[in-house]
Amino acid sequence: MRCLNGGLQSLKMKNPKKEFQEDDWQHFTDSIATLSKANLHIFDRAGMDVPYIWSKLRKIRREYDCEKRILVVRDLP
């Protein structure tokens, strides 16, 4: 996400102390600042099932009833 937002090459993120140039650090800090202002909810729990995800989604909907939300579910092996 930081790479997409800041326009950085993802390969540079593996070892930023070695690979980043001065302007890369500026892009990185700008993208982190933008992400820190975003309203993100990340639920990282082992064994999440569909009812648990729906309950979290309902809770977020009650909290932010006027705004549209996007739900992304990624199942990693």
Image: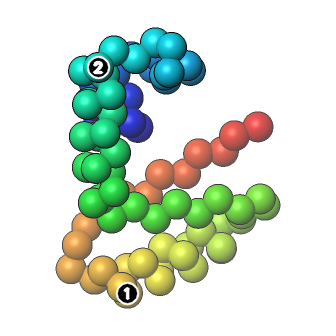
Q: Where is residue 76 in the image (x, y as percent from the top left)?
A: 69, 40
Circle 2: residue type: Glu
Q: Mark 2 points at which residue?
A: 22
Label 2: how many Cα within 10 Å (few below 14, some 14–19, many 20+): few
- Work out how far the residue at label 1 is from the one at label 2, CA to CA, in angstroms: 43 Å
Q: Name the residue under label 1.
A: 62
Which SS class for mark 2? helix
* Residue sitting at x 43%, y 58%: 71
* Residue sitting at x 57%, y 79%: 55
Quarter of the rendering containing residue 74: top right
Quarter of the rendering containing residue 44: bottom right
Q: How many labels does the image show?
A: 2
Circle 1: residue type: Arg
Question: Visible in this render: residue 2?
Answer: yes
Q: Which mark is residue 1?
A: none
Q: In this view, does 39 lie above or below 72?
A: below
Residues at circles 1 and 2 in contact by the CB criterion of under 8 Å: no
Which SS class for mark 1? helix
Earlier in the chain: of badge 1 and badge 2, it is 2
Front residue of this view, candidates 11 and 67 = 11
Question: Visible in this render: residue 4?
Answer: no
Q: Is residue 9 above or below residue 66?
A: above
Front residue of this view, candidates 36 and 41 = 36
* Residue sitting at x 33%, y 57%: 36
